[in-house]
Amino acid sequence: MKPIPFILVVLAIGGAAFGGYYYATHKQGGNAGKADASGRKVKFYQSAMHPWIKSDKPGKCTICGMELTPVYEGEKGIESAAGVVALGSNSIQVINVQTTPAAKQPLMRSFRFAGTIDDDDSRHRILSAYVKGRIDELFVNYVGAEVTEGQPLAKMYSPMLLAAEREYAGLARNMGQGEDTKRLLAIAKSRLTQYGLGEKQIVALVEKKSDDLHTEIISPMTGTVVARKVYAGQSVAEGEALFEIADFSKMWLQFDAYEQDLAWLKVGQEVEITTPSVPNKVFKTAITFIDPNLNMMTRSAKVRVEIPNPVIEADGVKRRELSHRLYAEARVKVDSVPTLVVPRSAILMAESGKALLYIDKGRNAYEQRTVKLGRAADGVWEILEGLKEGEAVVTQGNLLIDAQAQLNASASPTAPQAPGETAAKPAGTNAVAATLPALTAEQAAAVSAYLKLADAITASLAADNLAEYNTQASKTHTATPVLVKAFASDSPWRKLVDPIEKSGHLPNAADLTAARKTFHQFSIAVVDLAQALRRQETAFKSLKVFRCPMTKDAFEGAPRTADWMQLNPTLRNPYFGAEMLECGVEVKP
């Protein structure tokens, strides 16, 4: 069974129990103005389920059949204001209605982000060949090697570099021979610097032996070799990449934060990092950077935190605690100044997208209220408008109360729809406003026959009998022309008959859902005619029109409410059949 039918069953059972209770306790109550056994005077009698139904005498609600509740002098009774739903005591207990006062408190929010641990981008180097040459020897020949600044990585032979070295060494040995020599020495040193030699390497050239034809390539920084792109004996061109080195002493974790989350995040906030590769440990650090540029496709921005990555020793082997490009999760906890909040379970979303909740008004009455939401925090919503501190909001059972509100809205001719929704189409929308002429005997007979067929079609759907529906639907092909023929083309009644002519040829249906979808348009036209007949013709005042307030799920494209006509006064819902046979309220002419 669907949730909504269960809701109606619960409310019906609770309402019946509530009505029985009042019937037992107030059956002997007198008319308004008379005192009961306790000496209190009754002002009036009111329906607990439909507060706009009042009487000066005991009786039953004309909508739900519940016994009217006495309201004594000094009491206000149940408010019948728009959006107020009243429930019986038993109903409240059965659906377990719970409330909590709206209160101000700090908003607490926990975020979980996933990302990849990478090295510090500002400490990542690619070492390239400054001149053309040949790599004759590698001192570091595997990825993952830890190197220090100034450590030799490879030995290179380059005629161009060798010539520049020897030029500098010769000038350095003859520095005392004049200013021109000093100027040439400075030029030779600058050229060697451009070729990638460090200060110590240049100074050592004076002592370099003449038969030493190689130059060492040294590491420019301390770090880990993450890529080796050359082999011993390989010739390289100027600018060709040789090694890639990263500093793993400090790692970066970058993750994407969606734009609605950015209001909660700021530089300096504490972040807890966990990764499966280091179980049972939490790395605590802080946000160091939030990218001001949003990704237009994902509507997110990069957030960065920095994590110290010390060297650890395990089984005699030293390594960094965090490896390169690990998966990790970041958890950010934030709070705010105290603000008005309600539990998330109190908020319902209308079809219009507006947020609403129900407020306990006392005396088993609950008021529907539209509110403006702020930020969503852990377990609560921030309320910006529409609610005051201390008002009791319904946190459990509000779905059931909302179902009763929809039922009330359909039953009451003056009751508004849920906030943001358009009013339900009243029965007889297409009816002619002006007074219609009286039906002739021939017209009345044709109408009676057709309404009898329409009632049989409705009854077959209420009974979930597809075969019977198809049998009765096939009769519309001959019955509809007979009805139309009874009215001249210039008759005012034709404005009500023409829609039936268009929708009154019902095809065979493959299943009940398809049958109900086709029946809906047919029923609209029949109801319009029935409403006009009830207002105009005495012989048709016994016709009944009912409305189901929740036909949205009856078939694809179904409206929120739908009406139908019956000859039988006992309500039988054709849109849901046995699933919600008694779901609906009577619509007055």
Image: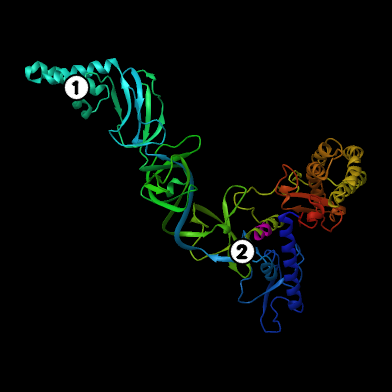
**Start and end of the magenta stretch?**
400-405
Name the image quarter holding the N terminus: bottom right
Amino acid at pointer 2: Tyr
Going by the image, does 318 lie left or right of 521?
Answer: left
Q: Front-most of 280 and 515?
A: 280
Q: How many labels does the image show?
A: 2
Image coordinates of residue 167 in percent, x first then y, are: 19, 16
Nearest the camera: 186 or 261? 186
Task: Name the residue tied to disc 1.
Answer: 189
Give the foreground label among 2 and 1: 1
Asked if marks 2 and 1 touch (Cβ < 8 Å), the reply is no
Residue 83 lies, in percent from the top left, at 62, 59
Q: Does the magenta stretch include residue 402?
A: yes
Farthest residue toward the bottom? Answer: 38
Task: Check residue 366 in the rendering and tell me which mark sits there, or answer none.
Answer: 2
Image quarter of residue 229: top left
Q: How is the image coloured?
A: rainbow
Q: Distance between the residues labelled 2 and 1?
A: 89 Å
Identify which residue, 508 or 440, lies in the foreground: 508
The crowding category of the residue bearing disc 1, from other C-alpha atoms within 10 Å (few below 14, some 14 to 19, many at least 20), is many
Secondary element at tag 2: strand
417 to the left or right of 505: left
Q: Earlier in the sequence, mark 2 or mark 1?
A: 1
565 with respect to 161 (left or right): right
Residue 272 can be seen in this image: yes
Q: Residue 265, which numbered label?
A: none
How packed is label 2: few (under 14 Cα within 10 Å), some, or many (20 or more)?
A: many
Could you tell me if residue 270 is visible in this image? no
What amino acid is labelled 1 in the image?
Lys
The quarter holding residue 95 reads: bottom right
Q: Is mark 1 on a helix, strand or loop?
A: helix
Predominant SS along the magenta part: helix
